[in-house]
Image: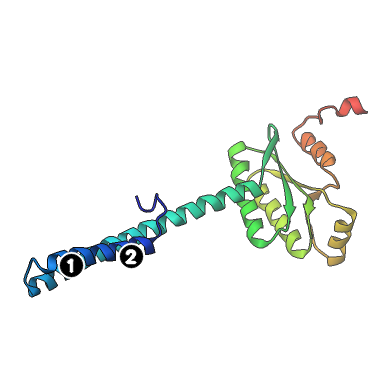
Amino acid sequence: MHAQLQIEPRHYLATMEKVIDLLLGVAKGAMPAEQLIETADSVRRVAHMEGAMVVDIYSSRTTEIISKQSRALTDMSTPITAIWDGILMLPVVGILDSRRAQDIMQRMLEQISEKRATVFILDISGVAVVDTAVANHLIRMTKAARLMGSYTIVSGLSPSVAQTIVELGIEVGELRTTGNLQDALRIAFERLGGELPGASKSK
């Protein structure tokens, strides 16, 4: 109950000590000194056991809340969308460090398995910096998705990013890339044996 009410353990323990002092103060004149000492020890021992339990439960619930909040933030930062049956897309925005790349990969593989996606589009047009580390993260994501039976397309490569990758000598291997999302979608529908909706009308 104290954990649900978000009463901090220090407040609870301070109140408990005050209550013990008041109870022992009342008992002081009602029993012999030796009995009072034994009673005080027993009361404090029980109070400390309960206090420890309260602290443990509070800590456990706090960890649980933090974990849920962290999961919610991860879900918000990795908004994977099913844009078509069998096609998932994730726009990556900001900085892609090792921790975030691991979170994205986990979410990516979970969604591929859950939605049975055969194509996954990673749009990195919003990624601030693409260096060796970022490129390696993308390659690992592509390989992991391939093991799950999903073909990955990395879209949103700007000319400067492409030049940076070449200058750094990064071996992209079988990494499939496109300069924009439209080309990525076209490839995705071709992989599914179809055609990008509206493509025939635009020709």
Q: Which amino acid is tagged 2?
A: Ala
How far apart marks 1 and 2 lie (CA) works out to: 17 Å
Q: Quadrant of residue 34?
A: bottom left
Left or right of 19 on screen, residue 92:
right
Q: Which residue is mark 1?
A: 25
**Which labelled disc corresponds to residue 51?**
none
Count the numbered circles shown: 2
Tag in front: 1 or 2: 1
Left or right of 79 on screen, residue 44:
left
Q: Position of residue 2 (x, y in %)?
A: 36, 53
Residue at (28%, 62%) from the top-left corner? Answer: 16
The answer to which of marks 1 and 2 sits earlier in the sequence is 2
Q: Quadrant of residue 198?
A: top right
How crowded is the residue under tag 2: few (<14 C-alpha within 10 Å), some, or many (20+)?
A: few
Q: Nearer the viewer, residue 34 or 124?
A: 34
Q: Nearer the viewer, residue 109 or 181?
A: 181
Residue at (81%, 31%) from the top-left corner? Answer: 196
Q: Quadrant of residue 53?
A: bottom left
Q: Which amino acid is tagged 1?
A: Gly
Q: Position of residue 137 (x, y in %)?
A: 70, 58
